[in-house]
Image (cartoon, rainbow, N blue to C red):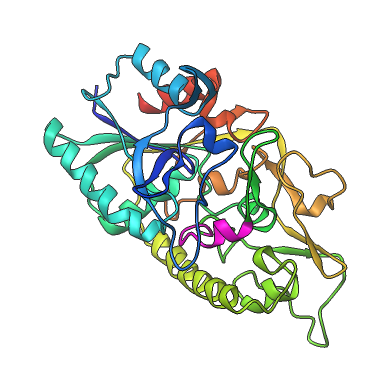
Amino acid sequence: MRTLLIVPGLFGTELQDPELGPLWGPFRCLYRGPLIGELPAPRGRAGRVVEGLSMGGVVVYDIIGKLLRALGRAGYRQGGNLFLYAYDWRQRILDDGPPLAAEIRRLADLSGGPIDLLGLSNGGLTLRAAFAVDRALPVERVVLSGPPLAGSVETLTVLHAGFQFAPFGRTVSPEEFVACPGAMDSIPSPATAAFFDADGPRGEDGAAHDLYDLDTWRALRLSVFRDDPDRPAWVEAVRKRLADLRETWQFLEGAAVPANLVCICGEGLPTQRRIVVERGRVRLPGEGNLRGLPAAAIVEGDGTVTLESARSWAGARPHIIKIPVRRHRDVVRTHRAFAAILEGLR
């Protein structure tokens, strides 16, 4: 069996700060803890990959623990032919690409030949960045499960409304997310970002909204501008994020195509594809809450990532494996997902 390196997605790696303590990783961070991000730059650094969140020695929320056990039954052994890549998922994908490419080369040298890669959810974008940095990576096979390769409206939803990790738990605010340099990396790409404007054409020229224009965020009261479109610190922060993000997508479009690419796509769920605007505000209800949205704004996917986005690696003709899901996270945490991943690695 070839060596396998796993790249987890968002929230898949611990964050530690020497003064503040854990920012993410322990169970208690679901309910309390320091800010994940703040201006001018988020504090802390990456720790270990999180297999699950535990309380009193009991895993109460699995992240990749069940997947690792499924891989173990198939013959993979951590530290032998299975490795986990820990990284700071708050940083820009462009910054994550070079160290990941270096780790891929290190493991290939160690194993004496090309290795396999598994990217989970947003980890797929990080892997794509490595192929943009190093176009001749020693890789035999790449398997991506639920990757937002063209971005996701759900990311925009989280940036707009925040995210609650657990019932009755704390909500990570839009300000915390936008303060992280890479927080916007998986919003819909410039090529796929689209609006459904129920208000009709804008102005005399009928110009469409542009997700990569700061004025759109301010006019529609998106995210950190929901209460005030003139917050100076956030005007400059979002301006920089959008400029950086255009650069990121251009960079990713030039990524080399893996020799063997497998994309595992969740299907069977309505997934928001277009950003709905009504009465001058956006409608971003989030995964599983799309009832009442115009049909033109919805396509099939896993509730978060559309089928189109999950297979959109420029220049590639990936092998597609579709699996039924009930939520996006099922592309990583169900027996169907494990079987699809092992099939893709064969």
Count every numbered label the image shows and give the total: 0
Spot the residue most to the front.
19
- Find residue 59 and report its horizontal and vertical position in percent: 50, 19
Foreground residue among 27 and 239: 27
Q: Is residue 296 left or right of residue 234?
A: right
Q: Is residue 322 visible?
A: no
Residue 149 image position (x, y, % from top left)? 50, 50
Measuring 50% from the left and 61% from the top, which residue is drawn there?
A: 38
Residue 181 lies in the magenta stretch: yes
Left or right of 249: which side holds 208?
Answer: right
Q: Is residue 11 magenta?
A: no
> Looking at the image, is 26 positioned above or below residue 55?
below
In magenta, the rendered stretch is 174-184
At horizontal 39% and vertical 21% (from top left) the residue drawn is: 68
Q: Which residue is pictured at 52% across the width and 52% down the height?
A: 35
Q: Is residue 48 left or right of residue 326?
A: left
Q: Is residue 235 in view?
A: yes
Percent x, y for residue 271? 70, 44
Measured from the top left, where is residue 113 in percent x and y? 15, 34
